[in-house]
Amino acid sequence: MNVRSKIQALNIVLGVLLVVILGLGLSSFFTTSKLKKTKDQALKQNLYLFERSMEDVRTCLDAEEYKLAKIRLAEALQLLKDNQKAANRNKAVQQSFDSIRKKYCRIWNSSEWGYSYRASDYPELQKGFESICQ
């Protein structure tokens, strides 16, 4: 095998190696992009679940089912806790979480609804809403 054929073989090997590296790089880029979209969708779904959980708490309070409200509030707080770190990376979702928290905090403290007064015998509810209102 002469020098020219060795150089041609080396060029072919380097060309194949370059194509493989580019393919892996593009594959990694698209996988990362898809993973980010999936995480954003999951975060938005959890935002919806948090809002529904808070509405369930309100429904329980309206029905004076304070023990059930305590359970639903604990679930909502866990959802909020689990998603807080991820939401901090996405400003729009963070603002949505904050607006939901403020909405239900205003409802809790509203004299019109009187939830905080009616649930005064349930310190777990008081403590849960205090953590939401922070």
Image (cartoon, grey):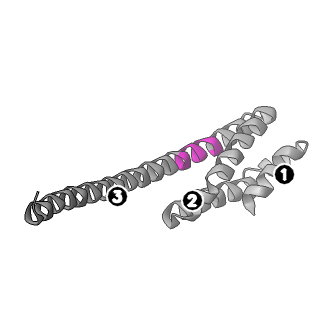
Q: Report which residue position mark 3 lands on.
A: 29
State yes or no: discs 2 and 3 in contact (Cβ < 8 Å). Answer: no
Quadrant where the C terminus is found in the figure: bottom right
Residue at 18%, 61% (x, y): give it: 10
Q: Report which residue position mark 1 lands on.
A: 127
Question: Is 103 on the left-hand or right-hand side of 66?
Answer: left
Q: Which one is closest to the eye, mark 2 or mark 3?
A: 3
Residue 44, percent across and down? 49, 50
Residue 134 higher or lower than 126, as above or below: below
Q: Between disc 2 and disc 3, whose residue precedes?
A: 3
Q: Between disc 1 and disc 3, whose residue precedes?
A: 3
Q: Report which residue position mark 2 lands on.
A: 87
Q: Secondary structure at mark 3?
A: helix
Using the numbered discs, state the Cα–Cα distance from disc 1 to disc 3 in whole angstroms: 45 Å
State yes or no: discs 1 and 2 in contact (Cβ < 8 Å). Answer: no
Residue at 63%, 41% (x, y): give it: 53
Residue 116, percent across and down? 81, 51
Q: Amino acid at mark 3?
A: Phe
